[in-house]
Image: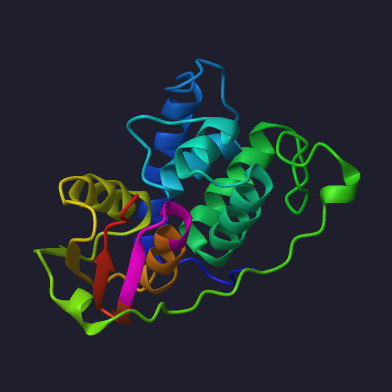
């Protein structure tokens, strides 16, 4: 899928795989079950590197259907060179072909059809465009960006807005997907500036 990997991407990939190896040895933070490499990657993608969760528990935390979570995360993962390489690593480690959909997440043959998820900017009233907090994340990318963003968003009250500056090119895909998956609202997205409203529930 990706013709050539840039040197900075290679560093991010090596760091991600190191994280995945560590996470795979840790049981789910909620139910205590062992996790596969794909579940570890899904946790990192959603900012749960320090408290990784299995597919079921991650879906419960996000309050979304398991299949929807899996499909949306798969779409995000395959669009980003760093995450995609992490996925390929998990496939190799678990004995799956590079292009295969692993049985751990696709137990039924009938499920093996994935439709791309189209991201769209959310339109909300201008009152929500004023930020309560600001954070310049610089070039932070991959799981580190959403991990830190998750922590910072939790410090806000429901309905408050974070103004985020994220210059990493991957943020253009990562942040809309992360917001949609977590229930936070992406008010504006004009790379590298993002306005994110904390969910009210």
State the extent of the magenta-drawn residues as a range: 180-187
Q: Residue at x 52, y 36 (%)?
A: 60
Of residues 189 and 144, the one nearer the viewer is 189
Q: Is residue 183 magenta?
A: yes
Q: Residue at x 26, y 74 (%)?
A: 194
Of residues 158 and 109, the one nearer the viewer is 158
The quadrant of the rendering that contains the N terminus is bottom right
Q: Residue at x 43, y 31 (%)?
A: 52
Of residues 183 and 9, the one nearer the viewer is 183
Residue 179, image x, y percentages: 39, 61
Q: Residue furthest top?
A: 32
Please state if 1 lies on the left or on the right of 137 as rendered. right
Q: Does the magenta stretch include residue 19?
A: no
Please state if 154 lies on the left or on the right of 58 as rendered. left
Residue 76, image x, y percentages: 54, 61
Q: Which residue is drawn at 46% across and 63% down?
A: 177
């Amino acid at each position: 899928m990706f013709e050539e990997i840039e040197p900075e991407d290679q560093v991010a990939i090596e760091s991600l795989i190191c994280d995945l190896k560590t996470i795979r040895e840790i049981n789910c933070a909620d139910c205590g079950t062992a996790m596969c490499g794909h579940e570890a990657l899904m946790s990192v993608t959603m900012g749960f590197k320090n408290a990784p969760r299995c597919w079921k528990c991650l879906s419960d935390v996000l309050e979304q259907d398991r299949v929807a979570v899996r499909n949306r995360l798969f779409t995000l993962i395959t669009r980003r060179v760093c995450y995609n390489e992490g996925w390929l690593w998990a496939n190799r480690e678990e004995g799956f072909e590079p292009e295969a959909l692993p049985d751990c997440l696709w137990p039924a043959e009938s499920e093996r059809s994935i439709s791309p998820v189209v991201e769209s900017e959310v339109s909300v009233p201008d009152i929500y465009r004023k930020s309560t907090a600001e954070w310049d994340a610089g070039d932070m990318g991959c799981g580190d960006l959403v991990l830190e963003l998750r922590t910072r968003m939790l410090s806000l009250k429901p309905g408050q807005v974070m103004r985020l500056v994220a210059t990493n090119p991957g943020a253009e895909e990562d942040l809309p997907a992360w917001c949609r998956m977590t229930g936070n609202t992406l008010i504006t997205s004009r790379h590298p500036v993002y306005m994110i409203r904390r969910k009210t529930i």
